[in-house]
Image (cartoon, helix red, strand yellow):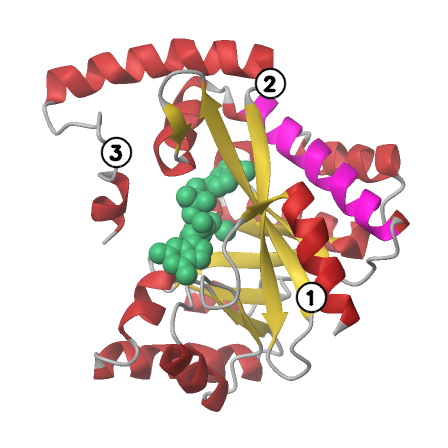
Amino acid sequence: AKQEGRNNYQWFTNDLNQRVGERVVLRNELQKAIENQDFTLYYQPQVDGRSGRVVGLEALLRWEHPSRGFISPALFVPIAEDTGQIIPLSQWVLDTACRQIKELCEQGMTGPSVAVNISPVHFQRSNFVAGISAMLSKHGLDAELLELEITETVLLNNAERAIDTLHQLKRLGVKIAIDDFGTGFSSLNYLKRLPIDKVKIDRTFVQEIISDLHDAAITQGIISMAHHLRLKVIAEGVETEPQFAFLKKSHCDEFQGYYFAKPMPFAELQDFLRARMLT
Ligand code: C2E
Ligand code: CA
Ligand code: CA
Ligand code: CA
């Protein structure tokens, strides 16, 4: 399913030579885009199942290419990781997300925190925690309003060091969620040692929970295990009412997906939140 998702681009091809060529082109264009700041953040609401309130916003990076239109992060983030361009890009994302969530607070739309996707390449940098801390100070943002979404892959090279980094982040007061949970190698053994707040059930499970008994069982297993470890559970990619109903019945805490709202630009988000506050 991951592979399918990545093939959704007209100009993306399976021909290896062409693909390598495209990567070189993209890499150069990415450099220009970073210099010109041709990026924008979209935000997707995360809804609490009990109160129905928007408790979080996932920041999703968008590259608006002058001629190709929107290019998916699923395509350019891996390239930026290979080239190291992910570092300035990631800094831009954090800076923008912190500034905009602060702006929401100042407009009286307090409540939702912002969740930022963190590449393992960035996470493993020695100055990562200092960078996060500096960003919070720069914007005068409460640490608990920032959530970092990391994947199990941060544990791959040096798990002890990654766990130490997580403890430092925890001391700063930022929240940590494990993204794409269930898709990686099994780190169930580590999970109990990780100072995290939340696990995020991957969309590939959510997609099949109504039609596939195994995915339903795995999802319920993840929720019950996470709750035993006192972690919150959020489901991503919730598209239909039956999926929502099943997850809610299974005691999932929070929900994100097209069923509730698509990712949207900041201006639209402000209208969305304002409208919800009035009801
Ligand atoms: P992800 O972190 O798993 O993000 C969820 C993806 O699912 C997003 O795709 C989102 O738009 C999409 N989505 C949300 N709800 C639904 C739904 O109901 N149905 C379906 N079919 N899709 C839904 P997007 O925005 O294209 O991002 C793709 C991936 O790119 C993200 O996967 C994340 O891994 C990466 N990414 C996005 N922004 C950033 C960023 O700022 N930094 C880094 N390092 N990676 C990012
Ligand atoms: Ca994510
Ligand atoms: Ca995912
Ligand atoms: Ca992901």
Q: Check if mark 2's residue and mark 1's residue have beta carbons within 8 Å.
A: no
Disc 2 crowd, CA 10 A, few/some/many (<14, 14-19, 20+) = some
Indicate the secondary structure of the residue bearing disc 1: strand
> Seen in the image, is 128 located left or right of residue 65?
right
Question: What main secondary structure does the magenta stretch of the protein show?
Answer: helix
Of residues 264 and 126, which is closer to you in this image?
A: 264
Residue at x-position 46% and y-position 63%: 236
Q: Amino acid at mark 1?
A: Val
Residue at label 1?
55
Disc 1 crowd, CA 10 A, few/some/many (<14, 14-19, 20+) = some
Residue 28, placed above or below residue 6: above
Instruction: Give the mark nearer the N terminus: 3 vs 1.
Output: 3
Quadrant into which the C terminus falls: bottom right
Residue 265, placed above or below residue 67: below
Task: Find out whether residue 80 is within the magenta segment.
Answer: no
Instruction: Give the mark nearer the N terminus: 2 vs 1.
Output: 2
**Does residue 125 show up?**
no
CA distance for labels 3 and 1: 32 Å
Residue at x-position 27% and y-position 46%: 5
Q: Amino acid at mark 3?
A: Tyr
Q: Which mark is residue 37?
A: 2
Q: Position of residue 74 (x, y in %)?
A: 37, 38
Q: Amino acid at mark 2?
A: Gln
Disc 3 crowd, CA 10 A, few/some/many (<14, 14-19, 20+) = few
**Does residue 215 show up?**
yes
In the image, the segment drawn in magenta is 87-105
Quadrant into which the N terminus falls: bottom left
Q: Position of residue 216 (x, y in %)?
A: 31, 81
Residue at label 3?
9
Residue 220, placed above or below residue 260: below
